[in-house]
Amino acid sequence: MQVIQGAAGAGLTLPLFESLAGVAAATSPSKSAKPPVRMAIYYVPMGVIRRGFFPGEAETKIPEFVSEPEAKSLVQTRVGIRKLKSLAPTQQPLESVMDKVTFISGLNRTYRHGSDVHAQCGSCFLSSATGETVASSVYPLARTFDHVVADGIGGETPFHTLELSCNSHKDNKESIYFDNISWYGTGHVAPSIRDPRQAYDRLFGTKRMSLQRDITDLVLRDARSLQRKLGRVDREKFEEYFEGIRSIEQQMDNLSKMKSNLTGVQEYNVPVSNESLMPRGEYIRLMGDLMITAFQAGLTNVATMMIGPERWNTPYMFEGLFDNPVSHHVMSHNQKRFIGELLKIDKFYMEQFVYMVQRMSAVREFDGSTLLDNMIFTYGSGLGDGATHQYTELPIVVAGGGGGRLQQGMHLHCAEGTPLSNLWLTQARALGLKGDRFADSFRVETDLLK
């Protein structure tokens, strides 16, 4: 890891440049070390509208609300892996990256009675521990997959794991189990960073400065001096990285100005916070940019991003979709009435995922590959459907090549009874980790591996 120092003790962490390392990767790839393989999770709350997300379910009956998990498969799909050739309506944003992703259907989780359905959705998404291994809690929750992976691939990165959340609301009426997907162990949450400025300061700031000047201004002179020492490819890579940091700073400034200009409004007869009125997409993309830049600079190899909390009724402003903030959770309980709005939200969240996939694909590594080539980036939710609260047939999409170890551009439909943890075990194998089991897994899904 390289750092350039500027005024007031400011520093900016840099990606690895082959020019400075004396590595001629462009002319002698065999002599170059390989970039690390990274892993990231993009968690979506409240499940999806199945008729919009899953091929073949467009004409199925819109389900009624069911308070506890209702296990059912609405459409039978042929078990096995095949080329991904068509996309359902809310998957359409994936079209531009279709050859970079694999759609996985048929994965299930087991609901353990004793807690709210939504509480186990997010908190146990990366765990799903067996009842025998966790007897001290009603939640089937042990050390989550991101921390298990980081134990193996975290190396000497400054941040063993990076936990981000796109929920800045302060009106929490739920327990921590509804709003966290990363856990050190049973009952021990890994707190998420929710404010972009806080994330920026933690990742890139060497000192908290009272003037809050941007780091790129403080290191600009040394940065430009360093750039002149780089080869052509590295100069382009440096410019891309430096301007990326600058763009993040500008986005944070814009959101801060917008927040300061907002005034509270009344909707649904309850107070709506200023955070509700901030553009949802801008907020998510900014947090995504921070995560991607952390990967690019070698600050971490493992990150999780929770796009929204489970069950919270707090409304959000989905810019471009609705005139006023809306509550995703409230609408998910009445799909017949809000089917159009819910389909738009599902597509909206997929668009933000695709934005990050495209950003990863544009980041060049020192050996000529891309960040996405060396990434396992999983989109998923702990519910297969928000109205029935079903824990079966979860919506899962995996982007990235995993360092050349994962299939891409495919659709895998798993055999009945396949647990989600089989996917985590398979990803662990792709990441080079040993072990024959994780949580309630029972096999590696070898069709996903090259």
Image (spheres, rainbow, N blue to C red):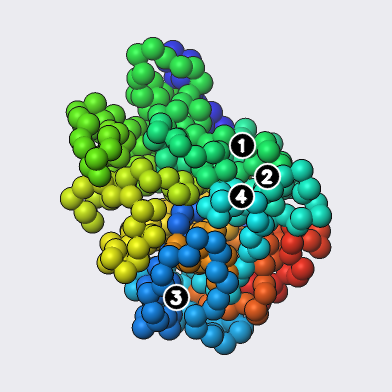
Q: Amino acid at mark 2?
A: His
Residue 38 in view of the camera: no
Disc 1 marks which residue?
190
Q: Residues within 10 Å of mark 2 (few under 14, many from 20)?
A: many
Vertical side of 130 occupied by 9: above or below: above
Q: Which mark is residue 115?
A: 4
Q: CA distance from mark 2 to mark 1?
A: 10 Å
Q: Are marks 2 and 3 in contact (CB under 8 Å)?
A: no
Q: CA distance from mark 3 to mark 1?
A: 32 Å
Which circle's residue, 1 or 4, is located before the other in the chain?
Answer: 4
Give coordinates of residue 94: x percent, y percent.
40, 68
Q: Which mark is residue 54?
A: 3
| Secondary structure type for disc 2 | helix
Disc 2 marks which residue?
147
The residue lying toward the viewer, choosing from 421 and 270, is: 270
The residue lying toward the viewer, choosing from 221 and 387, is: 387
Residue at 36 percent across and 83 percent down: it is 59
Q: Are marks 4 and 3 in contact (CB under 8 Å)?
A: no
User: Could you tell whether 259 is left or right of 50 in the image?
Assistant: left
Q: Are marks 2 and 1 in contact (CB under 8 Å)?
A: yes
* Residue 412, quarter of picture: bottom right
Q: CA distance from mark 4 to mark 3?
A: 28 Å
Q: Amino acid at mark 4?
A: Ser
Which circle's residue, 2 or 3, is located before the other in the chain?
Answer: 3
Q: Residues within 10 Å of mark 3 (few under 14, many from 20)?
A: many
Query: Of circles 4 and 3, which is in front?
Result: 4
